[in-house]
Image (spheres, rainbow, N blue to C red):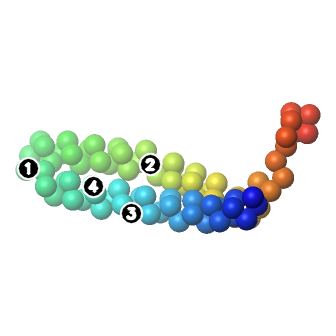
Amino acid sequence: MNDLKKFLGIIWMLLGPVIIIFLIMQASEKIALATEGIARTNTTLQWSIIILVFIPICAGLVIFGFYGWKGEYDKLPSSSSEL
């Protein structure tokens, strides 16, 4: 089980930047397809908010994956008395 946690830790660390890159690519594509004027402004605003919300989420994925990869989750308490 610990090997699985380490493997998934690497997956989470890679998934964070991949999601941000994917969102930026999608944003640039959708902004380029929007018509000039207020529609392009609205699309740009919406995608910038989406990207700003997902940056901390993806950073959390990377941190969570790093801890999993380093083995911080190898010994988890089974009850509250072990805390």
Residue 72 seen from this side = no
Query: Spatial distance from mark 3 to mark 4, Cα to Cα?
Result: 10 Å
**What residue is at 75 percent from the left and 58 percent from the top?**
1
Q: CA distance from mark 4 to mark 2?
A: 13 Å
Q: Are marks 3 and 2 in contact (CB under 8 Å)?
A: no
Contact between marks 3 and 1 (CB within 8 A): the answer is: no
For disc 3, the marked residue is 21
Asked whether the beta carbons under mark 3 and mark 4 sit within 8 Å of each other, the answer is: no
- C-alpha gap between disc 3 and disc 1: 24 Å
Residue type, label 2 = Phe
Q: Earlier in the sequence, mark 3 or mark 4?
A: 3
Q: Please tell me whether residue 19 is drawn above or below residue 39 in the rendered image.
A: below
Three-letter code, disc 1: Thr
- Residue that badge 2 annotates: 54
> Mark 3, residues whose alpha carbon is within 10 Å: few (<14), some, or many (≥20)?
few
Mark 3 / mark 1, whichever is N-terminal: 3
For marks 1 and 2, give the CA distance.
26 Å
Q: Does residue 22 lie above or below 82 as drawn? A: below
Which of the two labelled residues, at mark 1 and mark 2, occupies the earlier sequence position?
1
Disc 3/disc 2 C-alpha distance (Å): 11 Å
Q: Position of residue 66 (x, y in %)?
A: 66, 62
How many other residues sit within 10 Å of disc 2, few (<14), some (14-19) or many (≥20)?
some
Residue 6 x %, y % = 69, 64
Indicate the amino acid at tag 3.
Ile
* Numbered badge on residue 35: 1
Residues under numbered marks 4 and 2 in contact, where contact means CB atoms less than 8 Å apart: no
Give SS at disc 3.
helix
The circle on residue 27 is 4
Mark 4 or 1, nearer chain start: 4
On the image, the x and y values in percent for residue 62 come to 58, 58
